[in-house]
Image (tube, rainbow, N blue to C red):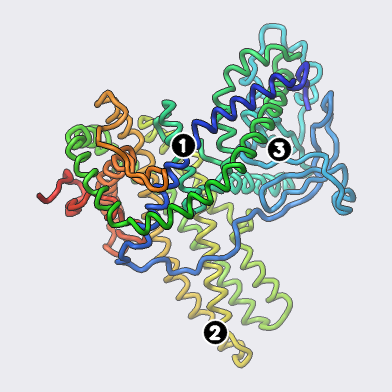
Amino acid sequence: MGVRPSSPLDKRQQQQLRGQVDGLLRAFLPCYRRQLAAAVLRQISRELEPRETVGSQLSHTKKLPRVREHQGPLTLLWGHPPQWQPTFCVLRGDGRLEWFSQKEEYESGGRPLGSTALTGYTLLTSQREYLCLLDDLCPSSSGDLAQEEPLRVLEEPVSFPLFLAHPFRAHLCFCAGTRGAQRAWRLGLQGAIRLRATVLQRSRVPAACAFLDAVQLYRRRRGFAGGDDATLGSDAEVLSAELMRELLPALRSQTLRGLRGAGRARARACAEFLDAVHATVLARVSAGLRAFQPEKDALLAKLERTVRAEFEQIMQQRAQWAQKLEAEIRDPLEACLCRMVDPQLPQLTLALLSPVEATLGTVRTLLIRGMDRLSHHLHKNPSGTRLRREVYEFGEIPWDPELMQACYREAERNRSHLSQLAEPFGFLGMQSLVFGAQDLAQQLMAAAVTTFLQLADQCLTSALDCSQAAEQLQKVRGLVLKKFTWDSETTRWSFTRDWLLGIFWPFVWSQLVVSSNSEQPEVDGDILAMGCQVLTTEGVCRDVIQGLLLQRIDRELKKSLGASDRVCSPAGCSVSLWLPLGWDMGHPGDSFHFHR
């Protein structure tokens, strides 16, 4: 689509890119190995930690998060020069979009004309916004607009557009036939973009957690201190995007000078050229991570055995390190928290709680409506095909983008205000935060729906008449709502807590580095297990900082929510094993100290 570069990537360019990918992996994989060791230690610590509170009440679904598949005709801007051409498009459950020449080609199992994973795309439904985006990518000089004959097709008004733009992949321009079709595609594509983006964040396995931590560590060492959206996507996609961001200025200032065209035509040509670069980078990164997989699996198995065997010794050593670090950073840390964090914490807490509470409230309303609808049909016709269809549709609520849209929209509330409050702390991760809140809504709805269907299946038998069955279902409804209330309260607490920590701690860390004029406080040596650093100075120092931050955050959450002890200590949120030995947790806002 659009104007092609004067030549594709030649062998020299491809070789250069492979060398740059190899350099990225050489710098990143040591960070990953280090964080694998730390992640295994954290997992074992959580397993061995005494559980003082009851965990989740709802039954978690065994179904993997997915996009509801969607298909239908769309017009695509395609070819050289670009023209609007009819296609048949299919949105897959894994968040991939495919397009075929016609429906029959798809139904006969033919190969698509093209396909793309929707990771990192931005969806626009305004032609004016898309043209402004092209203008921003390659501003036109005087007289350029007269040269844009190939792209006048884009300037002609189109109905019901769907523009998929990406910072370094080819743009996709579609048009739907009706406003209703445009809305259905918009909701489906938005869900696919989110699903692809949060694949690592949804995982709790040590390897995924270690990868996310390793990316942040790698970026901190390159001067990026604040939280941002750099970890959206799969592992290969995240690392590819990291390298592409590093290469982008040079690619635009040097290589792209040779592209023909001007203004908007040149902007689309740039996107196509960058797409070729990205494809080469992604293939090389994927191959590098696949080559590392056997080593990673062996390392995780060895770490699991070693850390379990030496757990008490490791934790004792960690406590000694934490005590030394606490003495070193106590004064500058407390000064930073009092000066920078405490004045902003109440505002940020309320700004975060508002959309989370609204989102969870909308999930509850949608759940009640679904349960009541099912009860109504059970009472009306307990054995008909209509009831079976209603049961199926109730189970599909979490994956129905139209029904869930009200919940997802609430997650966007306060976005601008929250972004303004968090920006002074270098936080640029609003997309990750919003996606996280939307995932939260979907996961909670899925758990509630699963629980209702399981309990209903247990209590409804053929021996019950309609009245008795409806009465049993009302009891199930009440029990599910109680479980939902418990889980939504703990979820609200932990989600807000985690994101407040994510906003503040990278900033506090960077301030301590600046104040100490060094990378980190000095503590002798690292503890090694199977050749990897199970404990590092940086890791222990991070835990000390986060421990004190969490005390302040918990205090503010109690104040904002009027929360009981039951809600204030949700399962899995305790940090007692990660605080220095002897740390007094008595008053969240007090300076931390040790019992001597």
Q: Which residue shows up at 44% across the image and 36% down it?
A: 216
Q: CA distance from mark 2 to mark 1?
A: 54 Å
Please identify the residue farthest to the front as the structure is shown: 530
> Is 292 left or right of 4, judged from the image as shown?
left
Please identify the residue farthest to the top as the structure is shown: 142
- Locate residue 279, reporting x and y percent: 69, 32
Q: Amino acid at mark 3?
A: Leu
Kind of element beneath mark 1: helix
Earlier sequence position, callout 1 versus callout 3: 1
Q: Is residue 416 visible?
A: no
Q: Which residue shows up at 42% across the image and 64% down it?
A: 487
> Is 249 left or right of 116, judged from the image as shown?
left
Q: Which residue is mark 3?
A: 162
Q: Amino acid at mark 1?
A: Pro
Q: Which residue is mark 1?
A: 30
Q: Amino acid at mark 2?
A: Cys
- Locate residue 336, reporting x and y percent: 23, 33
Q: Which residue is mark 2?
A: 459
Kind of element beneath mark 3: strand
Q: Is residue 226 above or below residue 98?
A: above
Query: Which of the 4 image quarters holds residue 426?
Result: top left
Residue sitting nearer the eye, 140 or 242: 242
Q: Quadrant of the N terminus?
A: top right
